[in-house]
Image (tube, rainbow, N blue to C red):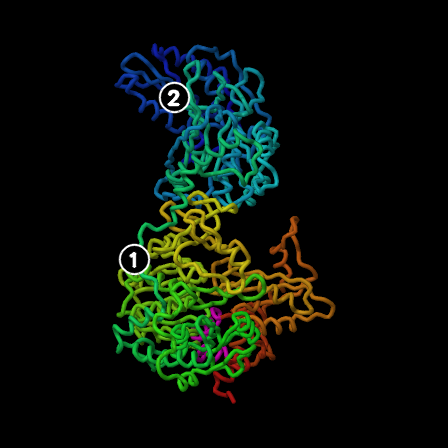
Amino acid sequence: MPHIATSWLTPAAGAAAARCHAVHVRLPDGADAELMSRSLDEAVRAWWGGDATEKPPRLWCEQVPVDRASGDDRVRAETGRALHPRDEPFRAVLLAFTDGQAELVVVAHRERLDAESLHLVVAVLTGRLNHDQVRPATPDDPGEAHGVTAEAWRAAECAAGLEWATRDGSAGGGTGRVAVELPAGGADSGASLAVAAAIVLARFEGQDRPLLGVLRNRRDRPAGALGAFDTGTLLALDLSGAVGTADLLARAAQALDGRGGRCGADRYADLVRRAGGGVTVGVVVAGAEGGGGAEGGGPEHATSYADGHAYTACQSAPFPLTVVPDRTATGLPQLIVHHRLDAVDTESAARFARHVALVHQQLAADGGLAPGSVQLLDPEETARTAQLGHPAAQVAWTPERIDTAFAARAAERPDAVAVTCEGQGLTYAELDGRATRWAAALRDGGAGAGDRVGICLDRSLDLVVAMLAVLKADCVYVPMDPTYPADRLAYTARDAELRAVVTTLDTFPRSGGTWCVRPEELEARGSGPVPVPEGSERAPEEAAYVIYTSGSTGRPKGVVVPHRNVVALLAATRDDFGLGPDDTWALFHSSAFDFSVWEVWGALLTGARLVVVPFWISRDPEEFHALLRAERVTVLNQTPSAFAQLAAADRRGAERLAVRLVVFGGEALDPRPLRAWFDRYPEERCRVVNMFGITETTVHVTARTVTRREALSGSRSVGRALPGWHLYVLDEQRRPVPAGAPGEIYVGGEGLALEYLGRPELTRERFVPDPFTGGRMYRSGDRGRLRPDGSLDHLGRLDSQVKVRGFRIELDEIRTVLLEAPDVVAAAVVVEGGDSGDAAQARIAAYVVLGPGGDTAEVRRRVRSVLPAHMVPASLTAVPALPLTANGKLDTRELAGHAAPPAPPVPAAPADRGTGLAAALTSLWEELLGVPVAGDDNFFLLGGNSLLAVRLTAAMRERGMPPLRLRELYLNPTVTRLTQVLEGNDT
């Protein structure tokens, strides 16, 4: 009789059903309960030998008050009722119905009795076999033979919910079940089923080496032996494309046939680490390919056999998703997927099952496919999935030029204040008039239709006037930040072939025939109307501005955006956000950052007031908060990094802000810290919106209102596409991936830029045909997943582009600049320190291999002369060689090991640290920066950044040190100099 292994696995009580399987047999002529009970007692005495360590099984009898035809529910309930792990080896229940028929149900743990054993136990109880015709089997090592250890399987049960599915945290141990038909004959191949499940899991998880759990019956016991251990096998298949599906099928068959070797706890832990978590998908298969049960069906199939037995392979789900081959009542093959409701919802489980069935069908038809060629979606689902990112809601709007739309607002409210800055302001009529005069001056100076005009001004009234003036002159504005190094400004001027530059910089690097003109000169020269006949301007479909973004080739690239895109963006958001003349917006961001496009024109094209935030105030959260409060700003746009500092300043103040709408953009948002904001600004008072967007798609693409619920759950959703925009998530072959699976984000619709300026090849590479609409779409390089409701989860970048404190940075651009230094032989650039989610700790780290006599100080000086401050590496480390992985890629883990180790703690007040305030500042800097600090060390060269600067001011306040304005730190970034300023000794 079945052998009860002494080292059997003990699952958690709440997961008992996940380890149980059952056999039930219909007895049309009924059964003699007393005779069956005696047969069981005799068999137990023979098989157990009087073992008193466990409660011996008995036959339970129940009279069911209906006939058998009406008793299916009762049979299903008994078949699905879990056996307590410490109760008895198995449970046998005889159900007697009113029409004289009966049903025998036997339930056992898979670790105690395998599928064939259950069938033979039933045969003994029903008199088809005598207990002495079979004997127990004793596996050599039932806890590990050909499988994983008990410890490993228990660890597998702790796998978390799947990211591509919805989970129900209140479901407890509940499970669901979905069924999908399979092609005839397909259900008999365990290897094909396992490979199909692995391919689907790999696509859903974005992996190329998924880890699969497989439960199978051992087939290597002596003839007539019962109770061999149902083993667990870990199957890790290489789906990178290195091998074809034929080899994958062969390897899977070898593993499932018990030839894959042992897999103890150490090996299991290694595989789990490689897979990035626990085993989340498992497959139940027969122990050997083609292994038989009656009628040619393996005993793993839940089907009716010749002896009337029916087998249920899983009462519940041993894994979050458990795939089981099955047969319908008519004998047709089907696939059953059991799923834990606390990890996978029914819709996601059904989707997974459909994909496994489709892949299984393809493998059966052609075993020579490459893994990447296997289709997960049939044509109908492909079309349906491609429509997920198309918003149902649309808005009616008319394409027009930005300056034309502004003129309409100015005509409606000429006396309303349009823009203010540091106590000065302009009404809509005054702004319109001044911009008209400047436009006339630009045309008089030789700027013609479509010419590009640079604007290199600090945030001020003049900046806003210049942007509008360039558009009124029918030119294209190119914003440049005056804090950028001269080399970068010169490059932009040359690349954009600027006809003119409006700037206050006397040192602006002139190139060719570029005309540099100051705002006061334009004001003095401008008179009369703009010499552009009405109706002769370029169309709304032509360029309005060019914004330069970081480029992988080592130099920034210009993104050309037409007028109509900005008007479309406002049309898509105006009604939803309630934008209008009663609002006050803040211009917080640099004009060279595309967030400023939304801030400037969002205010001026809706008749609102725009408050320009000077540079130094934007750097100081306390001053910025005071400005927002004084100006009663209602629409605030922030990167999450900047907002975190502002929210901290807000919590220190008693008076609430007037803000009613906060829009996040520029970098990924972790909504969890927003809980404190919602405490002060409830959702009905202040709406918080997370928006995803790209310069190439005109600032924003999606919108998601963030509520306290999202803040509690930590949702990564950026919402649905704006009306007029649409999204796809595609694989490397530009096929839609299943809903919930990761892939590359593509954007289509109204917001697409015209081109990369002067980069036709790059334009063709990134702006590609849209096969679903016939238009164009932008290949973003961002990774994401579309949910079934059309909302998008943003999952980061696919390439070397990163976001650091809201700035879009191509690491390859920094690397190229490093390689241009004469002393640098090789270079690598990575982002370090942001693993904890603390944006202030994220920093750019550079590693260089230097030639003979090379000096990192000289390399750093050159980098600072070319790159803007936010792109300068916080650390520059010389290494003898760049470490590589086995496949020739940069080994970032080993690279980090070459970084200078943390400095040992410095004594509290050594003689060379000074005394008083200087000593206190030195200690505080060392605490924040984690490095030794000397009096003349520069805070920012030691790794400081804007966020750490804010923390410095807060820490000084908490310790009772003199108040520090951030402007003073930026202008005096050493301990010695800053101490002099704070003590009033600055000379």
Magenta portion: prevailing SS class: helix
On screen, residue 894 versus residue 646, left or right, reads: right
Q: Could you say which quadrant of the image residue 959 lies in?
A: bottom left
Residue 175, percent from left and from top: 38, 35
**533 versus 7 height, above or below:** below
Mark 1: which secondary structure? loop
Q: Which residues are magenta?
A: 946-970
Q: Residue at x 38, y 46 (%)?
A: 387
Q: Tell me the kind of residue under disc 1.
A: Ala
Mark 2: which secondary structure? loop
Q: Residues within 10 Å of mark 2 (few under 14, many from 20)?
A: few
Q: Is residue 541 magenta?
A: no
Residue 447, percent from left and from top: 46, 76
Q: Residue at x 64, y 62 (%)?
A: 827
Q: Which residue is at the front of the view, 287 or 196? A: 196
Residue furthest right as drawn:
852
Q: Which residue is at the front of the view, 582 or 833? A: 582
Query: Which comes before the other along the chain, label 1 or label 2?
Result: 2
Q: Which mark is residue 107?
A: none
| Residue designated by label 1 | 396
Q: Is residue 968 magenta?
A: yes
On screen, residue 722 versus residue 296, left or right, reads: left
Q: Residue at x 37, y 81 (%)?
A: 437
Q: Residues within 10 Å of mark 1 (few under 14, many from 20)?
A: few
Q: Tell me the kind of residue under disc 2.
A: Ala
Q: Which residue is at the front of the view, 468 or 808? A: 468
On screen, residue 220 versus residue 578, left or right, reads: right
| Residue designated by label 2 | 329
**6 versus 14 height, above or below:** above
Residue 704, percent from left and from top: 35, 56
Q: Residue at x 49, y 84 (%)?
A: 981
On screen, residue 28 versus residue 502, left or right, reads: left
